[in-house]
Amino acid sequence: MRFGIFLLAGQFPGQDHTDALETAVAAAVAAEDAGFDDVWMAEHHFIPYGVCPSAVAFASYVLGRTRRIHAGTAISILSTRHPVALAEEAALLDQLSGGRFWLGVGRGGPWVDLEVFGTGLAAYEEGFPESLDLVLRWLTSPRVEASGTRYQFREVPVVPRPRTRPHPPVVVACTSPGTVELAARRGLPMLLGMHIGDAEKAELVNQYAAVARAAGHDPGAVRHLAAAVAYVADHREDAVKALRAAMPGWLERGLAGYQRVDGRPTERRDPAAYTDLLCSIHPVGSPDDCAARLAETAARTGIRHFILFVEGAGDRDRTLENIARLGREVLPRVLERIG
């Protein structure tokens, strides 16, 4: 089993950008003290849902502030990045951290980011496979050239090469059957989101296994990741009450910031209903409640690596207390249940 924390640096009501980012940094450092294995940072642009625009930059800062814990991106958005630039940064962090960096990548969405960064809607709709393959070639080869649809360049040396072989860990955010198939054909682990429950996770894991076997990979050798909301209190009612008090206001303002690049309307979740859903399917409650929920998800899905969203109470002190209690009171109980 591996346990990490998942940080959005969300700007909750009453906070400014400094509050959100300082809380996220403090949480990352606290996670190492609490015994977590890794810290994962989300990447968003132009919205208060998450005020970190570069997960790689945040990961590099965390790696410099810590000594043991690993840091990953959840995710770096390939639709708005040049894959070689991202791969160079990943190789550099792998070298400087002694192999403590994980690169999580995904397509992102059809948002205005594509317009601002000049990559266009095609980068989101069609460009992800080419970008992902270029990242993988850069992280595994001494020299690379490209003759694809979006990227064409002469052969150049890879400098620096990663220290981790065959390459630093790469995970793919999967929210659709097409992305699951893409990851499975390359033998890369999936990162599954907070918005789905155990049944949906298990379905995606099973789909992955079938495609991976057909492509010549052993699905049993792949460690998938799942994000989950986690909040511990003495009683489940107290934990749910804390999240219901903070998350809907943050979600309402944050999710409203998404703008499609093509101008089409965006379907938005009801913030209060979404908070209730997250509380019902994730480890929210007493230490025993949280441990039982994580153990049950592991049994139903086969997933053995969880990254826990710990900022849901919207307050620095509560976030740090949540991390400490999860590390002290929940994670050992999960391991006892799983054996």
Image (tube, rainbow, N blue to C red):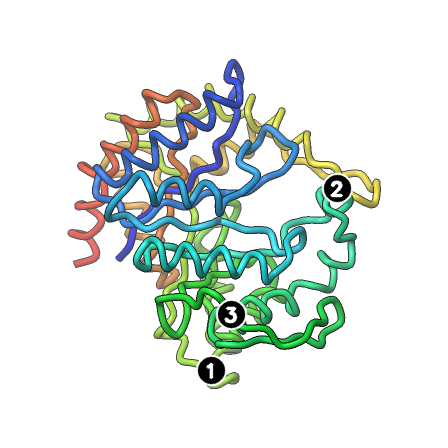
Q: CA distance from mark 3 to mark 1?
A: 31 Å
Sequence-earlier tag: 3 or 1: 3
Q: Is residue 224 above or below residue 31?
A: below
Q: Residue furthest top?
A: 14
Q: Does residue 256 sit above or below 262 in this rendering? A: above
Residue 326: percent from the left, percent from the top?
A: 25, 37
Compared to residue 215, the image places residue 270 above or below, namely above
Q: Which mark is in front, 2 or 1?
A: 2
Dot label at residue 213: 1
Question: Which of pointers 3 and 2 lies earlier in the amino acid sequence?
Answer: 2
Estimate how packed mark 2 is, as few (under 14), some (14 to 19) or many (20 or more) residues with alpha carbons within 10 Å. few
Q: Is residue 296 left or right of residue 213?
A: left
Circle nearer the viewer, 3 or 2 = 3
Which percent across, then down, holds residue 320?
30, 27
Classify mark 1: residues with Cα within 10 Å, few (<14), some (14-19) or many (20+).
Answer: some
The residue under label 2 is 116
Front tag of 3 and 1: 3
Disc 3 residue type (three-letter): Val
Residue 235 in the image, given as x and y percentages of width and height: 27, 26
Name the amino acid type tagged 1.
Arg
- Separation of marks 2 and 1 at Cα, in angstroms: 40 Å
Binning the other alpha carbons within 10 Å of mark 3 as few (below 14), some (14 to 19) or many (20 upward) gives some
Residue displayed at 53% across by 36% down: 52
Q: Which residue is mark 3?
A: 158
Tell me what residue is drawn at x 41 percent, y 45 percent: 60
Q: CA distance from mark 3 to mark 2?
A: 29 Å
Question: Who is closer to the viewer here, 97 or 2?
Answer: 97
